Amino acid sequence: MRQALGVNVPNFGPGTRPGVLRGWAETVEGLGFDLLMVSDHVVVTPDVAEQYPAPFYEPFTTLSWLAGITTRIRLGTTVLILPYRHPLLTARMAANLQELSGGRLVLGVGVGWARQEFEALGVPYGRRGALTDENLRAMRLAWRDEEDYRAGHIPIWVGGGSDAALRRAVLLGDAWHPLRFTLPWLSERMDRLAAVAESLGRPVPELAPRILLRLTGTPVTGEGRRAGEGTLDQVMDDLERLRLLGAETVLLDPFCGDPDETNHPETAWHMLETVAAAYTKEHP
């Protein structure tokens, strides 16, 4: 089976505005990518702003708009911070987006990390893991209501690399969704995921990773090299190694951390075009 490739589109930063988001959607779908995903924050507190500066476009609103602009590409979150919203609100918005987009939604979820944002929303930071588990169960229960929610099956990708996250992926997710890692780390965590699944008597969930995309003119070496970082040959080799580990879908993340990148999306679009052309050549 051909490995599906997706793109994490920056829905934040000083250069982000409706026309740019439209350009991202048209570019990513036009290049033949299979999935477009966006991030989630509600309050741009100082700890959030260090990594995801304002303005920040809320994911359900943004994806609903992009669903009307696109026709084929799947749409999703990487990752929706579940404790921030009441589970029935999240279930409702997800079910509506699933129906309005023609069944194209993939819901990546996580527990969150920005303590100041939790405080601003009045959500207990120390209970974020338990709240995430409770919310997932409540959402799946709501989606069983075929007369009202009419959600069908919405794939849930569970983010995070801790043992708690692996357990959550096994018990409550369709796939494990690790973010921006080195391949040795992933290999160790995959072994741990298999052990957790065995201990719970459950199947190992699918692997659906998000990797950095940073193309360089010369090879990137050293133990700290993250998957997706380096020459085109290195990136293509990473995709093949991920396929051999069982990743049927890989999300490429071209945002390298500088807010000014959002003012020049053409740089990321060129990298994506390069990877898409090379991948199509290898997998016609």
Image (cartoon, grey):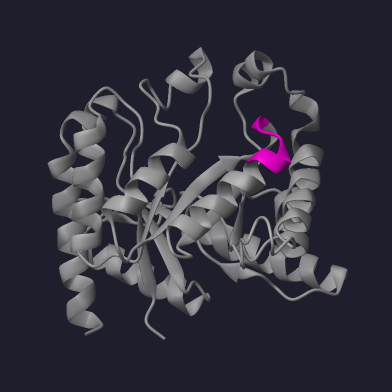
Q: Magenta span has 128? A: no
Give the total number of marks visible in the rendering.
0
In front of the other: 28 or 235 = 28
Q: Is residue 25 above or below residue 201?
A: above
Q: Quadrant of the C terminus?
A: bottom left
Question: What residue lies at 55% left-to-right and 60% top-to-bottom?
Answer: 186
Extreme-front residue of the structure = 147
Q: Is residue 167 above or below residue 198?
A: above
Residue 81 at what x, y percent from top left? 61, 38
Q: Looking at the rendering, which quadrant does residue 88 occupy?
A: top right
Q: Looking at the rendering, which quadrant does residue 27 occupy?
A: bottom left
Q: Which secondary structure class fits the magenta region best?
A: helix
Question: What residue lies at 63% left-to-right and 42% top-to-bottom?
Answer: 90
Question: What residue lies at 79% left-to-right and 65% top-to-bottom?
Answer: 196
Q: Is residue 264 above or below residue 226?
A: above
Question: What residue lies at 65% left-to-right and 31% top-to-bottom?
Answer: 84
In front of the other: 106 or 102 = 102
Chain part drawn in magenta: 84-89
Residue 85 at what x, y percent from top left? 66, 33
Q: Quadrant of the N terminus?
A: bottom left
Q: Is residue 141 above or below residue 160?
A: below
- Side of 208 relative to 86 (left or right): left
Residue 176 at what x, y percent from top left? 61, 61
Q: Looking at the rendering, which quadrant does residue 149 occupy?
A: bottom right
Residue 220 is at least partly visible in this image: no
Residue 234 is at least partly visible in this image: yes
Residue 274 at what x, y percent from top left? 15, 61
